[in-house]
Image (cartoon, rainbow, N blue to C red):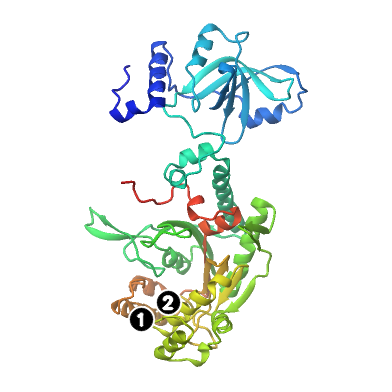
Amino acid sequence: MTTPLKTPAEDENEFRSVRLKKLENLRQKGIDPYPSGYDKTHTLSQIQQAYAYLEAGQETSEKVRVAGRIASIRNSGMFIDLSDPYEKLQIFCHKNHLNEEQLELIKLLDLGDFIGIEGIVRRTPRGEITVNAEEITLLCKSLLPPPEKYHGLQDLETRYRQRYLDLIANPESRQTLRDRSQIVAAIREYLSQKEFLEVETPMLHVLAGGAAAKPFITHHNALDMDLYLRIAPELYLKRLIVGGLSEKVFEINRNFRNEGLSTRHNPEFTMIEIYEAYADGHKMMELTENLVAAVAEKVFGKLQFDFNDIQIDFKAPWTRKPMLELVKEATSIDFNNIYSLEEAKAAAQKAGINASEADSWGRVVETLFAEKVEHTLIQPTHVTEFPLDISPLAKPHPQNPRLTERFETYVNAWEIANGFSELADPLDQKGRFEAQVAAKARGNEETMPFDQDFITALEYGFPPTGGLGIGIDRLVMLLTNSPSIRDVIAFPTMRPKT
């Protein structure tokens, strides 16, 4: 087998050029630089744990087989530090244990190569668990050097674009993504114990419903029709409740919203949506508190977390306050006594907030809340009683028809959850959808379409139901002290390099 011709750019890469020569040398020696498989007896962590009893200078007679990536090479290859995702292990390569062919192989090894080692375990006089290599097997020849190990990979652009380099260089990044996996697993475990049924719903929608957001559009060639990437699974999950699949369902789902990027927003993100028949918004608030606390205890063993310079306490119960009350506290404006859109806009203007783009009383309230209140909600807080005209899927408040039994949960000034007593009245739902269509005609792009099939489903009977959505990415950020959503998503969306 011959080495492919190099491009001019490859010729300029001195490190790669040297490694390509070593690759050719290996092949000339009959060594396969990319073999299939390797039969390990232990992981590196298992070696460290199983032989922790060894005294300094003590050697075993037990032969082991381990594998990993070369993290360092010292003393002309006499000492190699092997690494795997969780641990490091020192390998001792000496002529007393290796034949000439194996000693020549060591000269062709580089940082980043994967190797397998067979040998005897000992603890050095200096106290380090070590394997005396008796056989070295090359498992993968790397053609590019790993990031410089002592300072890690600091450049954010490279870390996010080439996550594999970030993971090689930065143990903290590996741990954050492992924590994310454990958080999701703990969520599943908690809900399963509470007899919730995990389900799957479509990611390709005929209508972009279930949330107020701009969708991504794709095209199905065989049907010759446009489809929308899911912005929320809500309407399908409610259909499952109507159909009686279960009284408790949840879905951990990828959603796609064609909107801006920020430290808290990525075009594709992960949520969990939960629906429980015969529950209401109050029970959903309790579920939010209990679920987050259970996950925090399970994964991290605590309820208090440092985020930047703030300590956040997830111990229940969390604060609950109506939106209008919070706006009044921040602005002295009582929107209970303001009824028309023009009055609302004028009040906002007096408070220094331009709400001229708002197309409803509720939108004005929402604008003031966003500007005057959100940034103050640091400890976990349920904001309740949202305006009806910004809550097209929530049940009306029994004492105030302009409000709903809807809440959003804020932590560190971020919305992390959204929940309702779900709207079950099909005629009311039809009117809400019609209002959304009218708002879109007035220029509001973030509205819901008219979904006749969903209304039909409600007409077959939808029991009183509580619904809840929690943003997984933001929750992981809070629990892992990660300042950017890109830190907790393995492959965040990035603009291509030009």
The quarter of the picture where residue 447 lies is bottom left
Q: Kindly identify the amino acid type of the residue bearing the numbered disc 2.
A: Pro
Q: Is residue 271 above or below residue 152?
A: below
For label 1, the residue is 435
Left or right side of 299 for 346: left
Alpha-carbon distance for marks 2 and 1? 9 Å
Q: Is residue 346 above or below residue 24?
A: below
The quarter of the picture where residue 233 lies is bottom left
Give me the residue at 54% from left, 81% from top.
327
For label 2, the residue is 392
Local SS, label 1? helix
Residue 424 appears in the rendering: no
Q: Is residue 328 above or below residue 56?
A: below
Left or right side of 437 for 373: right
Q: Position of residue 291 (x, y in %)?
A: 61, 61
Local SS, label 2? loop
Q: Nearer the viewer, residue 78 or 456?
A: 78
Q: Nearer the viewer, residue 416 or 293?
A: 416
Q: Kindly identify the amino acid type of the residue bearing the numbered disc 1.
A: Ala
**Cβ–Cβ under 8 Å for marks 2 and 1:** yes
Residue 444 appears in the rendering: yes
Q: Position of residue 235 (x, y in %)?
A: 42, 67
Q: Position of residue 352 (x, y in %)?
A: 47, 82
Work out which quarter of the rendered image holds the N terminus and state it.
top left
Give me the residue at 40% from left, 57% from top.
267
